[in-house]
Image (tube, rainbow, N blue to C red):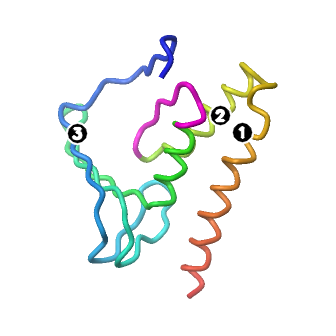
Amino acid sequence: MSLDCFCDYDPPEFYHKEIRKARKPHQCCECGGAIVIGERYEHVRAKWDGYLGTHDTCERCMDITIWTQNNVPCLCWAHGNRIEDCREAINEAMWRASEETLGLRFGFLRLIVKRDRLNARRRAS
């Protein structure tokens, strides 16, 4: 993260993240897709503003977030909105340095399409 990166949000009172292997079906809080038995997913328990919350995120949405963090100097995201926050960070990076970020949006959209196609196949079956 660069020195000029500032995330304007209050941190949670506590935050516990773990990568799990699904023993029962879950639904991704980011894309709404299915997390099937045997699939890895991120499970978060945290307390924000006095409220306890849990968030399950599919492996594909985790990959999109990690890819964006690796390619954008500043990424601030919130659970339930992380993909849109990634999109905004990419747009900001492209606005700041259009020559250096050629192909950035293409790489991001490739991952979105991959996720959406898998979700559509799972819904169809």
Q: Which residue is mark 2?
A: 90
Decide if residue 42 is on the left or right side of residue 6. Answer: left
Span of residues in magenta: 70-79
Decide if residue 40 is on the left or right side of residue 114. Answer: left
Q: Is residue 33 above or below residue 112?
A: below
Secondary structure of the residue carrying tag 1 is helix
Q: Earlier in the sequence, mark 1 or mark 3?
A: 3
Q: Is residue 52 above or below residue 28?
A: above
Decide if residue 87 is on the left or right side of residue 95. Answer: left
Residue at 70 percent across and 48 percent down: it is 107
Query: Marks 2 and 1: which is nearer the front?
Result: 1
| Type of amino acid under label 3 | Tyr
Q: Earlier in the sequence, mark 2 or mark 3?
A: 3
Along the line of sight, which residue is nearer the eye, 86 or 48?
86
Q: Which residue is mark 1?
A: 104
| Type of amino acid under label 1 | Leu
Decide whether residue 38 is among the magenta residues.
no
Q: How far from the left and from the top, in percent, is residue 79?
A: 40, 44
- Magenta stretch: helix, strand or loop mostly: loop
| Type of amino acid under label 2 | Ile
Decide whether residue 73 is among the magenta residues.
yes
Quarter of the image for residue 26 reads bottom left
